[in-house]
Amino acid sequence: MQQLILTPLLNACFLHLISLLVITSHFIFTGLAQANQNGQNVIFILTDDQRYDQLGFMNPEIQTPNIDKLASEGVHFKNAFVTTSLCSPSRASILTSQYMHNHGVVDNNSSADESSRFFPEYLQDAGYHTAFVGKWHMGGTGGDDSYTDNPQPGFDYWLSFPGQGNYFPVKDANGKTNTFNINGERVEQKGYITDELTDYSLDWLDSRKSSDKPFFLYLSHKAVHANFAPAPRHESIYSDVTIALPASMADTEENYAGKPMWVKNQRNSWHGVDFPYHSTLNVAEYKRQYYRAIAAVDDSIGRIMAYLEAHDLTHNTSVFLMGDNGFLFGEHGLIDKRNAYEESIRVPLLLWSPSMVEASQTVEKMALGIDIGPTILDIAGAQSPEQFEGDSLLPLIDTGLESISGKTASDWRDSFLYEYYWEFNYPHTPTTFALRTDQYKLIQYHGVWDTEELYDIQNDPQEMNNLIEEPALLRTKVEMREKLFELLADSDGEHTVPYTEKFNSGAVLRNKDGSKAAEFPQKWLRGDMAPDRTQYFTPDRKILERRESDNND
């Protein structure tokens, strides 16, 4: 009788023990998976002025084997964009995961608000060892192109330089060579900047080999910012390549039909093909130099990948490559960036992570610069803070990691906001607001008497046919105007630029028999190589000080 009672008890205990082991093993394996996710190293490589199609696998004019390897073995976000196409604001959006009207870096002279928090700060909180190497370019000190390069929050190791930096070491009037700020100390630049930034990055990776912390490296290249200067080893490559220029570069009525007046006027300006950078620069040859400068960036990526391979880090390291904005080479008669056309706002974005993602993936959905912080935090197993406006990209890809963002591919964004604020030193591009969906793009200009633009991107990817007055698209225009105005509201529901929601074209009419449009001031007209064509770099205050000094002498 006693044995009959004990047997069921023993069986029950045994079953309970098995159950506990199963539950325990579940938590052990779940914990290991989370630990592996939290231990994933991340390298984020940011290039300057590299637009979406300046990659070897997309452009037969150039060769980028190491960049191509990232794409073939990882993920290509085919429709990646910045929310503002200008160095400092775009970089601030990446770091804060906020639109420009919320983080406040509205031009290349503005510093981030003191209340801003950069996503690497949250990585530090999650136990990461962090480093920043390269171009920071936020915060001016008085209009003389001097920018802060002081160490910033979120980084255990810091290396930067003032402003745009220099491709090669430069000596000033006193014979002193330009410097890097390395953790608060001044160190002279010694060589070609793309190579040297890579050297410092690899040195930092080497210095922390014994650390048990995962690492985050933010390698922020100067390249390929204008004026493009290749490494000596690349000075002659692509000499036999015929550089194609866009059909929209031609000064024809057909090309400018429906385009705003400012686009036609900008053609003969600092950012136009008729007077590029106030010079006789040849746009095709300029693009050739751009290709040559990209070659060193590709070499840099190859060196980093070789390091990961040599140190057995490929299994637990994710590598991102992104551009901070696009660049026009003659499209619509323009060069450079700032405007809302595709070549200006669309950028490369690649993710390589052998242990985490399936190879050779192409993501069609829209990815933004403000998504970088949330994605990297997601990889690290850390939640994004409430103020972030971007989303983790992990739900869009086949990955071995489970996203903690709560987002899914099915509820992904269907549009995004683009904004650019007028700069007095480059007055040819007006304040620009745009809303881009998968099919359409609406562009508005604030403070100028000019037309809106509406393009069917799917059927008109070169943005040649302005449909703003197309009756069949009236509903599309109305709804996109409303959505654009909604997105321009800041976190308090206010509009940084106080203006009324646009509900029609306004009182824009002119008498066809009346007076013609005014000409530009005669004083602004210069010859191709006029000696004062770059005088705008010099603040009036300095001219005044010189004049007063001369008078005193």
Image: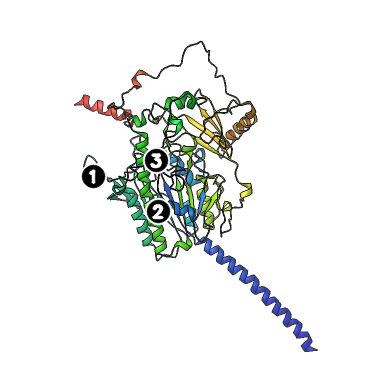
Looking at the picture, tell me which residue is in the foreground, 450 or 1. 450
SS state under label 3: loop
| Front tag of 2 and 1 | 2
For the point 25% across and 28% down, the residue is: 546
Quarter of the image with the N terminus is bottom right
In-image side of 164 versus 70 (left or right): left
Q: Which residue corresponds to mark 3?
A: 139
Q: Which residue corresponds to mark 1?
A: 176
Q: From mark 1 to mark 3, how far is it between C-alphas?
A: 23 Å
Q: Please state which amino acid type lies under the numbered disc 2.
A: Ile
Near mark 1 (Cα within 10 A), the count class, few <14, some 14-19 or many ≥20, is: few
Residues under numbered marks 3 and 2 in contact, where contact means CB atoms less than 8 Å apart: no
Position of 153 relative to 250 (above/below): below
Q: Which residue corresponds to mark 2?
A: 301
Q: Earlier in the sequence, mark 2 or mark 1?
A: 1
SS state under label 1: loop
